C-alpha cells in the first residue's frame, strides 16, 4: 500500500512539473470550483494570519483592558480561584497562548495576581505580551475563514466569497482589538461559527435539524462564556421559525413540533456549555486567594463557606461547591454590571455605532518628533459599505412587502430579512444596555459583521435582476477589493503602532476625525504692541 501511495505521489508530481493534472491542464484543474474553494479559503487564512497575528509584542506595554486581563492571567498561572467582570473562557484561552509561547517566566509578574487592575507602568521590564496576545490573533484569523465560509454559503462561488471576506480581513477595528490581550476575538469567532451553522440550516432543509440547532447553541454558549452580550444571537433561530410558520399550512403541528425540538436542543446545549466551562474554571483553580490582597478582598463577599473550605483544603469538592462557585461568579458579574459607570469620555452612544462613534486612543508613544498610536479606528470604506448595505436592504425589503415585487421574492431576500431583523434586535438590546452602563464602539462588532453579510446578499439579488451587474460583476468585486485594501493601508499605522509625523497623523483626519494627534500642541503666546 505504501509503495502504491508513493508511486501515485510521484506520478502527480511529474504531472505538476509538466503543467498537467490527469487529462486536464493544471490551470484548468485549479480553476474548478471545488478546488477554488479550498485555495481561496487558504489564501484568506494566510492573509488574515499576516494581518491579525504579526508583531504581537508591539507595543511592549499593556493598553486598554489588558491592564485588567494580565492580572486575571496571573491568577490563572497560579491556579488561584478568582472572579472577573466577564466569564472565564477567554482568560483560559489566553493562558493556552501563553503556555504555547512559554514566555511566562520572562519576568516575575506573580505580584500582579494581587490586584484586579494594574497601573501599566508597574508591569515588570521584560514582560512579554506575545503569549498573552497569541490566541487572540489566531482566533482573529480563524474568524476570517468562518466569515469566508459565510460568504461562500451566500454566493455559492469561491472567488466572490473571498473578495467579500476581505471586509473582515482588512477591517482595522477588528485587527487592533483582536491582536491584543482582549476577549473580543474569542467572542466574535465563536459567534461567527454559530451564525455559519444557523445560515447553513436556514439555506438547506436537510441541515435544519435538532443536531444543527444543538451545535448552534453550543457555539453561542462558547461566545457567551467569553462576553455575555452575544447571548442576543440566540434570537437567530426565531427568524427561521417565523419563516417556517409563515409557509406552513394549517394545522401546523409538525412545524411547531420541529421548532420546539430545535429550541430544546439550543437551550440544552447552551446550558451544557455554560455549566461545563464554569465547572472547568472551578476545578482548574483550586488555590485559595490571599484574602488580604486587593483582589482577594473584592472576591471574598462572593465566596461561600463551603467553597472557601474546599479552597483551603478543609472540605471536599461537592456539587454544592460547584454550584456556589458558579453562582458566586454570576453574582460578581452582576455586581460589577450594576456598579459600572454609565458614561465616560471614551464611551459611545450605541445608536451612533454604524457611524463609527466613537474612536478610542488606546495608547500613544512619542519619540524623536514622531508618534506611534494604538487606535480603535475602523476602515472607513468598509463601514460605509456596511451602512449603505443596511439602507439598501431596508429599501428592498420595503418594496418586497408593500409593492410585492416578484424579483424580490427570493431565498436570498429571506436571508437578508433575517439578518436585518437580527441586526435590529442587536441594536435595540445594546441601546437599552447603553442606558444601564457605559458602552464602547467595539461592542458593535457583531452588528458590524451582520451589516457586512448583507453585501454578498445584495450582490446576489441585484446581479440576478440586472443583466448589466451580472455582465460587469468583476468590476464591482474589484471596487470592494481595492477599496477595502486601500482603506486598511491608510489607517494601518494607527492599527500597528507605527510612527507618524504630525502632518501624517492629521492627514488621517480627512474627511473625518479618526485620531487626536499627540502630543497636543501648546497654544502660542500672543503679543500686542
Image (spheres, rainbow, N blue to C red):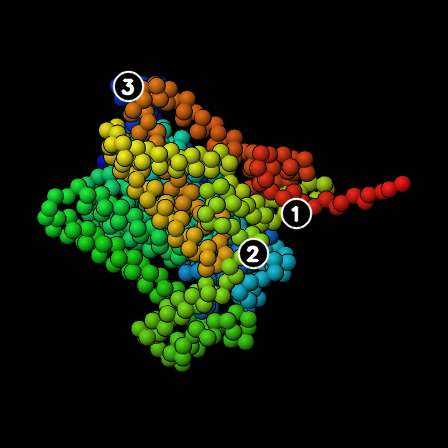
- Taking depth in this image into account, of 148 and 331 the one nearest to the observer is 331
Residue 93 percent coordinates (x, y) = 43, 55
Residue 101: percent from left, percent from top: 49, 51
* Closest to the observer, 109 or 164: 164
> Hey, which residue is sitting farthest right in the picture?
529
Q: Earlier in the sequence, mark 3 or mark 1?
A: 3
Discs 3/2, front: 2
Task: Determine if residue 469 is in view.
Answer: yes
Label 1 crowding class (10 Å Cα cut-off): few <14, some 14-19, many 20+?
A: some
Q: Earlier in the sequence, mark 3 or mark 2?
A: 3
Looking at the rendered structure, the secondary structure element under dot 3 is: strand
Identified at 38% across, 78% down, the residue is 306
Residue tagged 1: 365
Q: Is residue 340 above or below residue 101?
A: below
Classify 10 Å Cα crowding around label 2: few (below 14), some (14-19), many (20 and above).
few
Residue 302 vertical position relative to residue 447 in the rendered view, above or below:
below
Mark found first going from the N terminus, 2 or 1:
2
Residue 377, horizontal then vertical, whole percent:
54, 42
Decide: is 210 above or below 474: below
As drawn, is 522 to the left or to the right of 515?
right
Q: Can you identify the residue that label 2 sits on?
A: 344
Of residue 65 and residue 135, the one placed in the foreground of this image is 65
- Vertical comparison of 425 with 2: above or below: below
Mark 3–mark 2 distance (CA, rounded to whole Å): 64 Å
Question: Relative to residue 358, is residue 305 drawn left or right?
Answer: left
Residue 103 appears in the rendering = no
Q: Which residue is mark 3?
A: 24
Q: Quadrant of the C terminus?
A: top right
Give the Cα distance between marks 3 and 1: 57 Å
Give me the residue at 58% from left, 34% from top. 511
As drawn, which residue projects farthest toward the bottom? 314
Residue 261 is marked as none
Amino acid at each position: 500500500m505504501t509503495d502504491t501511495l508513493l508511486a501515485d505521489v510521484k506520478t502527480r508530481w511529474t504531472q505538476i512539473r509538466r503543467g498537467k493534472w490527469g487529462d486536464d491542464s493544471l490551470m484548468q484543474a485549479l480553476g474548478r470550483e471545488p478546488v477554488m474553494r479550498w485555495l481561496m479559503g487558504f489564501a484568506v487564512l494566510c492573509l488574515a494570519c499576516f494581518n491579525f497575528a504579526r508583531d504581537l509584542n508591539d507595543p511592549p506595554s499593556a493598553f486598554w483592558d489588558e491592564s485588567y486581563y494580565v492580572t486575571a492571567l496571573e491568577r490563572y498561572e497560579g491556579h488561584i480561584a478568582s472572579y472577573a467582570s466577564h466569564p472565564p473562557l477567554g482568560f483560559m484561552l489566553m493562558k493556552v497562548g501563553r503556555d504555547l509561547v512559554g514566555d511566562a517566566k520572562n519576568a516575575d509578574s506573580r505580584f500582579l495576581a494581587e490586584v484586579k487592575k494594574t497601573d501599566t507602568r508597574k508591569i515588570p521590564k521584560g514582560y512579554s505580551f506575545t503569549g498573552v496576545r497569541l490566541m487572540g490573533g489566531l482566533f482573529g484569523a480563524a474568524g476570517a475563514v468562518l466569515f469566508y465560509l459565510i460568504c461562500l454559503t451566500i454566493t455559492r462561488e469561491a472567488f466572490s466569497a473571498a473578495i467579500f471576506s476581505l471586509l473582515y480581513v482588512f477591517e482595522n477595528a477588528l485587527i487592533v482589538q483582536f491582536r491584543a490581550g482582549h476577549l473580543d476575538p474569542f467572542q466574535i469567532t465563536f459567534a461567527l461559527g454559530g451564525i455559519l451553522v444557523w445560515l447553513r440550516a436556514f439555506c438547506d432543509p436537510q441541515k435544519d435539524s435538532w443536531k444543527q440547532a444543538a451545535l448552534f447553541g453550543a457555539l453561542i454558549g462558547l461566545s457567551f462564556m467569553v462576553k455575555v452580550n452575544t447571548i442576543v444571537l440566540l434570537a437567530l433561530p426565531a427568524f427561521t421559525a417565523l419563516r417556517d410558520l409563515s409557509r406552513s399550512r394549517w394545522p401546523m403541528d409538525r412545524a411547531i413540533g420541529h421548532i420546539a425540538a430545535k429550541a430544546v436542543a439550543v437551550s440544552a446545549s447552551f446550558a451544557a456549555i455554560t455549566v461545563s466551562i464554569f465547572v472547568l474554571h472551578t476545578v482548574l483553580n483550586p488555590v485559595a486567594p490571599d484574602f488580604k490582597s486587593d483582589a482577594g478582598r473584592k472576591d471574598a463577599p462572593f465566596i461561600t463557606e463551603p467553597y472557601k473550605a474546599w479552597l483551603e483544603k478543609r472540605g471536599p469538592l461537592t456539587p454544592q461547591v460547584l454550584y456556589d462557585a458558579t453562582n458566586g461568579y454570576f453574582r460578581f458579574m452582576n455586581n460589577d454590571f450594576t456598579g459600572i459607570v454609565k458614561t465616560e469620555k471614551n464611551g459611545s452612544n450605541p445608536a451612533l455605532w454604524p457611524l463609527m462613534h466613537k474612536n478610542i486612543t488606546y495608547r500613544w508613544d512619542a519619540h524623536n518628533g514622531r508618534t506611534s498610536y494604538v487606535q480603535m479606528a475602523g476602515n472607513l470604506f468598509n463601514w460605509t459599505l456596511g451602512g449603505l448595505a443596511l439602507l439598501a436592504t431596508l429599501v428592498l425589503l420595503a418594496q418586497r412587502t408593500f409593492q410585492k415585487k416578484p424579483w424580490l421574492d427570493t431565498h436570498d431576500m429571506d436571508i437578508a430579512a433575517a439578518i436585518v431583523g437580527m441586526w435590529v434586535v442587536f441594536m435595540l438590546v445594546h441601546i437599552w444596555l447603553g442606558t444601564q452602563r457605559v458602552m464602547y464602539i467595539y461592542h458593535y462588532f457583531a452588528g458590524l459583521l451582520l451589516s457586512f453579510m448583507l453585501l454578498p446578499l445584495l450582490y446576489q439579488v441585484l446581479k440576478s435582476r440586472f443583466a448589466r451587474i451580472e455582465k460587469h460583476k468583476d468590476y464591482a468585486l474589484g471596487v470592494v477589493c481595492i477599496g477595502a485594501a486601500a482603506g486598511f493601508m491608510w489607517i494601518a499605522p494607527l492599527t500597528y503602532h507605527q510612527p507618524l509625523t504630525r502632518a501624517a497623523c492629521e492627514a488621517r483626519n480627512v474627511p473625518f476625525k479618526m485620531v487626536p494627534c499627540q502630543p497636543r500642541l501648546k497654544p502660542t503666546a500672543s503679543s500686542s504692541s
